[in-house]
Every structure is written in structure tokens, then in C-alpha cells.
Image (cartoon, coloured by chain):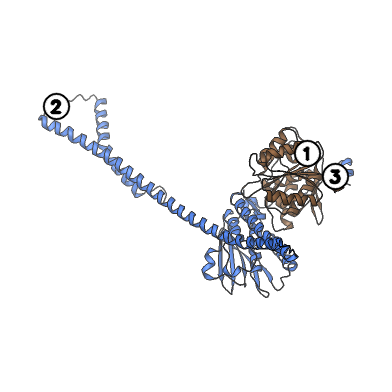
Chain colours: A blue, B brown
Amino acid sequence: MTGIPTTGAVKRAAVMAVQVGPGLLGLVVGLALLLGDDDRTVQLQAPLWVCLATVGLVVSALVVTVVRDSRLRSAQAAAVAGAVRTTREEADVRARAEHRTFVSRLDHELKNPVMAIRTAAGVMRTGEVDEQLIGIVDSQSARIALLVADLRKLSDLETAEIAAAPVALEPLIDDVVTVMRDEIRTRGLPGRAIEVQLPRIPWSVPDVSGDADLLFLAVYNLLANAVKYSAPGASIIVRAMEGSGGVTLEIADTGQGIPADEVDAVWDELQRGSNARGLPGSGLGLPLVRTIVERHGGRVQLLSREGRGTSVRLWLPFGPAASRPAVPTMELQVVSPAERASRA
Amino acid sequence: MGSDLSRQGTLLLVDDEEAITSVLSRFFERAGFAVVVAADGEQGLAAHDAYHPDVVVADVRMPVMDGREMVRQMRARGAWTPVILLTRLGESADRAVALDEGADDYLNKPCDPQELLSRVRALLRRQVVGRQPLTTVTVLACDGLRVDRITREVTLDGQEVALTPRAWLLLDYLVTRPGELHTREELLTAVWGFDFPTSTRSVDARVSELRQALRGYAVRIETVPGVGYRFNGDVQVGAQ
């Protein structure tokens, strides 16, 4: 519909034509007569009161037009300003509410480890120092350190420069799954099998655009969650599908799931499911994933049923076709005898 | 403990938080250092002049004179004692800013004391007495390779080399620490400023990107199987 003006523009043009038209017409005709050496004159004879009334009416009409126009403009400006103010006030109220929620969650996350450390210190002051007490101080302070480190990551990622290099998803998913299988082995979490389903026919998933390290971190966090919230015997699956304009990655598990009334809040900072209390975590893993994906121009979605499992989907836009990785080339290197000797 | 002290050297600890200095000084003393404590940047400078420490660990945010200003003044006086700055949430350890300050290393506060100790030891190993540490130099040269750490311009035999921001950070980290062996985890953290779950391939991909850009000089980045990478070469202070 390009080239067709809106109704408002049409109206404005019509009003302008009516206002300026007669004046312009008079000017053009007068100019034509002047150039055509037309020296006819018009002598108008009218009573004085008619002349005065006519001049008065014209002046009044002019004043009315100008005043009405400026009033209209200021009313429009006031309306716009009012709308902006309302939006800003609403945003302020929302930001204050979010801040309050954040602080109360931070308070919640900090008070338990702090209380544990203080209690341990109190016991130690009585002269009773044992491995358990030292262990509590160590693990609880580590918990606070993790929280602070994750907050820092999140804050860094919100402003970090995001690369736009082509990222091949297949090797990335392979890497994450390899790292996670190692962790499952070393942390003694048997019975959690990770399956990977990637399309090969008719072709593999295309590259996406972005930073491989950060996308690794996002997929790793999701897979770590799937493992953490699953009991032995649970199934975990990583899928990738090509869609319009991008690739959807899905990490699904048959783990403990999230209560229905808490699903919407999982992407919020420091929000942890009521059934996740006994498990370690800062409540910043999913916000980190969301920040990474959104900074890549993508979207996140989470579906969950308590007791049944969870599916998290990431949609990431395709990488630019022109920047597909080039085939590595080999080069001859000239090495001086001295250099060869120093390397040996 | 006299022999221990002479073995590890003197460490100047600058922090206004007594809870930190009292515990950290005990920790470093246990590790064999003679520790001198100062409560702010001004006291830090005075202690530096009086005790000539081998290494300085300083907080950034302090009253009277902050850690960044203290390092600036130390460098302005021509003192090249290696410095580790402890930064906090929101205090970006931006490389350009860092270079301007002249600190040799950064660590996020709170940090693991063992990690801090290993950084201190790495700095002491790297230091050549009386020579400006490469981490504080603005232009580095190694044969035909020239790295301008302010403009981020890299040239090979006079020809400009195009690098992605992360590849640049990786090169910067490697050339300022020649001959040192770095694990993949360390390199990944160095270019990002925070810990990552490790994937060997992620760092390998960055290194191969860097090697491709460096063409004939790629051989200088040595792969140490099963451990990580090392940059080999005689890195010098380059002409501005």
C-alpha cells in the first residue's frame, strides 16, 4: 500500500487547498492579466458601513483560524505528552515492582547461607571446631559467591558485544552433550540418559549467527537443568529443527517439572521453583539463557507439567549465508634454521 | 619463617575492609609471603616506597585514593611492581581502561583465595626485575608481528590483520604472556571475564581462527596436547 496517503493526510491537504486555493487563483489570474497588458480597472462603490463590516469580517476570520489552529496544536501536544507521561509512570511503577521482587528474592537467597555461616562461627567461638562446621562455612560462602558471580555474568551479558559469526549447531550440541555426560559420570548421577536428535535428511540444521561460546553456555545451562531436575531413569532429549527464518533447539526431559502457577516466572531473576529448594542453584540460570538468546535476536519458550517434565525451546535466527565458514587452506611456512633450532 | 619469606617475597595488600586484609594477610603469610597491609591508595603508595614489595594486591574501591589511581601514580613514578586489582560487580575490567591504568591482572571480588594466590605466583614468575611488564605496554612487537593494544591494530610484516573482537583478546592475552602455558579454561575466562563450563572445542575454534589470521606466524601458537596453548617468541616493546 505504498504511495497512498493516510486519511489524516488527505484531510489536511483538503483543508490547505480550501485555505490557500482562492488566494493562489487570484494571484495567478492577476499575474496573467498584468503580463497580457490588460489595463482594465474596477471601481467599486459601496456604503462605508459595508466596507468596514467586510474588513472586520475578514480580520475576524483570520484571527479565528489562527487561534483555532494553535489551540488544536497545543491540545494535540498535551495529549501526546499525557500519553508519554502515563507510559513512563506505568513503566516506573513496573520497574519499582520488579525491583522490589528482585530485592525480596535476593534477601531470600542470601539469608539462609548467611545465617548458616554466622551460626557456624558462633559455635566455633565456643572452641568447638570440626570438619562439619568448616564445611558449612565453605559451602555456604561458595553459594553466595556463585550467586554474585552469576549476577555479574548476567549484567555483563546485557551489555557485552555479541559476535555475528556463523555458528554450526551440530558440533556445538555434541560438545555440550559430551561435557554433560562427563559431568554425569564424575558427579555420580547414573540413570540419566541424554539422547540427541538432529535432522540429517534432507539436510542438517543450518548455521545460526552469533557467538559460539555464549550459545554453548545457554545450551549447557538448559541441559544442566534437565539433568539436575531429573531422577534416575528419566529421559533427556536434545532436538534441533529448521523453521522459517531460524532454527529451533529443544531440550526436553521427563524430570520433576514446574508447578503450573510458577511456569510464567521461571525466566525472572532469582526465581526458583517451590519444588527446587533442596537443589543447588542461583535462580539465574534461565535468565542467563534468556539474555543470551535475546541478545542473539532469538526467543525462548518453556512448557512444563509438574511430575511429567519440561521442554525448553530456543529459536535462533539463521546466520548470514555469505559468512559460511571458508574451507581451511594450507600454507607453506618458511622456517629459518635458527628458528627451527629454537623450536626444537 | 625467615627463609620462607625470602623465598616468596613481599606482598603489599591494599584494602579498606579490615575483614579482608586480616584474613588475606594470614592466608598469604601461610603461603610464605611477608605481607604489608595498607588501608587506602595513599597509604598503599607510601608502603610501596617504604617496603619495595615484589607484588601488590589492591581493591579498586577505597576511600581517600582508589586502587586505579594508586596504580596510575605508581606507574607515573616509573614503578613496575606487578599489581592485581580486585574488581566488583559492575566494575568492568575493560581491556582499554585496564591498559590505561597499568594493572597487570584483574580478579573479580569475591574470588577464591587459592585462585588469587596462583595469579600472584604467575605474576612473580612472569616479572623480569626492572623491566616494564608486557601487560602494561601499549605496543608490542615480535619479529614481523606488531600489536597496538590501544587501537587494536594488528599488522604482520606491515600488512593489517583483521581479527574478530574475541580473537583479538585471545592474541592480546597470549602475546603479553609469552612462553607461558595456558589451559583452555584460563583462555576462555580471559577473553570473557567470567568462568565458563569448559568445552575444549570452543577455545580450539578461537585459536584456529587466530592461527588462520596470523598465517605464517601461526606456528608461534603452540598446542600443548592435553593441556592448552603457549605463545612462543621474543616479545618486545614496539615503536609507537
Report in which chain the residue with disc 1 lies: B
Asked whether disc 2 touches disc 1, contact meaning CB atoms under 8 Å apart, the reply is: no
Which sits earlier in the primary sequence, circle 3 or circle 1? 3
Instruction: Please name whichever residue, A74 or A103, is drawn nearer the observer in this view of the structure.
Output: A103
State the image coordinates of residue B152 (x, y, percent, origin top left).
68, 40
Going by the numbered disc 2, the residue's amino acid type is Gln
In front of the other: label 2 or label 1? 1
State the image coordinates of residue B30 (x, y, percent, origin top left).
80, 52
State the image coordinates of residue B210 (x, y, percent, origin top left).
73, 47
Instruction: Please name whichever residue, A157 or B130, is drawn nearer the observer in this view of the structure.
Output: B130
Asked whether disc 2 touches disc 3, contact meaning CB atoms under 8 Å apart, the reply is: no
- In the depicted structure, whether residue B12 falls above or below residue A273: above
State the image coordinates of residue B54 (x, y, percent, origin top left).
79, 42
Q: Residues within 10 Å of mark 2 (few under 14, many from 20)?
A: few
Q: Quadrant of residue A21?
A: top left
- In the depicted structure, whether residue A114 falls above or below residue B220: below
Going by the numbered disc 3, the residue's amino acid type is Ser
Residue at left offset 72%, top offset 72%: A190
Residue to which mark 1 is pinned? B51
Residue to which mark 3 is pinned? B6
Report in which chain the residue with disc 3 lies: B
Tell me the CA gap for discs 3 and 1: 14 Å
Same chain for labels 2 and 1? Say yes or no. Answer: no
Q: Which mark is residue A43?
A: 2
Instruction: Please name whichever residue, A139 or A90, is drawn nearer the observer in this view of the structure.
Output: A139
Query: Is residue B156 at all visible to an observer of this figure?
Result: no
Tell me the CA gap for discs 2 and 1: 109 Å
